[in-house]
């Protein structure tokens, strides 16, 4: 076991392994030629470099900031200031790397992303508020992309960002023990019977989504999604026409979105992954929305433009609050009385190419 009695420790048939990163390497090596170690010697070395960076620059400085505030270490303001400055320096370097890389090494998740994602999750959940992380937008995008992968969700569950920095919990010095008074026989105290009301209290019903409380709409969203998915030929005549026949402007609203930072979209696969991560994070509104995201252009920088159909006459408030990507886009409600805007909607549903005079790199659908 660990020679100084700490955890985690992994018991194996050949003996124990301690320290988180060593355990992670051991488990990864159990599968021969595991792609989590990259596809070449240089990728393996780069994965290890980021593992070291994650441990010494990210995890260590999050701990130096967080643990004194929780009372696990002595709180010293100057030490906290140094830890925060060091963490910002590390996140700044990470942000620069992720500006043109979806993941830390290569085009797929590796052990480096697993370790970095877990270390960052402590900071995001416990102390790194939105006002702190907004300086590092590429780190934010990377983190939410990683932790929303299905295999991460199985272990970490839903990750929510800290809303405030924990208050300092001062450690109280141990009090000297007082001499014990002579014990007297305790009087038997009659226990109060628990209230039947308390025993039978039912769990509170789950609050309804505000969108479920809207007046009924003649547009059945699932019918539209089925029509979209099942139409293989004559798409404009069948699916697009069907959409306008179904559309209910009293029960739904249409929105264009344009990415604010298209000049950053210089690498095609990074741009595609950025959009894919956005759609993953929109899963909370799948029951109430349909979307098309177009990546436009035959060469960099690529434009990201979208069309969204939402239940209700405005963008749902819980989406604006929960999906951080929303603020990365300019949103404009579609005026369906404007024939030009209506035609643009039709073209986006259809993946019409060329779109506004440019080729499509890709088109993604949220349904």
Image (cartoon, helix red, strand yellow):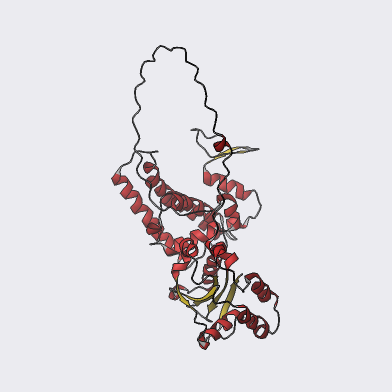
* Residue reaching furthest to the left: 78
Relative to 101, 224 lies left or right: right
Query: Which sits in the foreground, 21 or 45?
Result: 21
Task: Please name the residue shown 53% across and 58% down the image.
Answer: 146
Question: From where the camera sits, is residue 242 visible?
Answer: yes
Task: Please name the residue shown 56% across and 54% down the image.
Answer: 111
Relative to 238, 260 lies left or right: left
Q: Quadrant of the C terminus?
A: bottom right
Res 344 → quadrant:
bottom right
The picture places residue 98, in percent across and down from the top left corner, at: 46, 64
Question: From where the camera sits, is residue 107 visible?
Answer: no
Question: Considering only vertical position in the picture, is 40 above or below 75?
Answer: below
Give the total of numbered labels: 0
Question: Considering only vertical position in the picture, is 290 above or below 2?
Answer: below
Task: Please name the residue shown 62% across and 71% down the image.
Answer: 221
The picture places residue 307, in percent across and down from the top left corner, at: 53, 76
Q: Quadrant of the N terminus?
A: top right
Question: Considering only vertical position in the picture, is 263 above or below 111?
Answer: below
Res 22 → quadrant:
top right
The picture places residue 284, in percent across and down from the top left corner, at: 56, 61
Query: Which sits in the foreground, 301 or 190?
Result: 190
The picture places residue 249, in percent across and down from the top left corner, at: 54, 77
Query: Which sits in the foreground, 219 or 63?
Result: 219
């Amino acid at each position: 076991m660990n020679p100084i009695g700490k955890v985690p420790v992994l018991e194996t048939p050949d003996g124990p392994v301690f320290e988180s990163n060593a355990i992670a390497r051991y488990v990864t090596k159990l599968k021969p030629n595991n792609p989590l170690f990259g596809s070449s010697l240089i990728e393996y070395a780069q994965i290890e470099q980021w593992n070291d960076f994650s441990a010494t620059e990210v995890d260590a400085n999050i701990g130096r900031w967080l643990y004194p505030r929780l009372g696990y270490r002595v709180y010293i303001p100057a030490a906290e200031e140094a830890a925060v400055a060091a963490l910002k320096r590390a996140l700044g370097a990470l942000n620069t790397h992720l500006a043109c890389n979806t993941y830390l090494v290569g085009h797929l998740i590796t052990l480096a992303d697993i370790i970095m994602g877990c270390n960052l999750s402590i900071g995001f959940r416990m102390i790194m508020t939105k006002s702190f992380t907004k300086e590092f937008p590429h780190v934010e995008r990377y983190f939410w992309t990683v932790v929303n992968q299905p295999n991460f969700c199985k272990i970490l569950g839903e990750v929510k960002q800290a809303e405030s920095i924990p208050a300092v919990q001062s450690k109280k010095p141990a009090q000297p023990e007082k001499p014990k008074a002579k014990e007297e026989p305790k009087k038997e105290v009659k226990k109060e019977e628990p209230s039947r009301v308390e025993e039978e209290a039912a769990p509170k019903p789950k609050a309804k989504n505000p969108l479920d409380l809207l007046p009924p709409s003649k547009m059945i969203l699932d019918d539209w999604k089925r029509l979209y998915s099942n139409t293989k030929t004559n798409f404009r005549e069948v699916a697009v026409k069907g959409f306008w026949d179904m559309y209910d402007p009293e029960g739904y609203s249409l929105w264009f979105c344009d990415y604010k930072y298209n000049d950053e979209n210089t690498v095609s696969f990074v741009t595609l992954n950025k959009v894919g991560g956005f759609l993953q994070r929109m899963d909370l509104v799948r029951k109430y929305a349909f979307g098309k995201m177009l990546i436009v252009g035959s060469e960099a920088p690529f434009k990201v433009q979208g069309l969204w159909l939402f239940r209700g006459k405005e963008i749902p408030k819980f989406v604006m609050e929960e999906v951080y990507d929303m603020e990365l886009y300019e949103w404009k409600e579609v005026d369906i009385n404007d024939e030009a805007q209506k035609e643009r909607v039709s073209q986006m549903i259809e993946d019409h190419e060329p779109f506004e005079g440019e080729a499509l790199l890709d088109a993604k659908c949220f349904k």
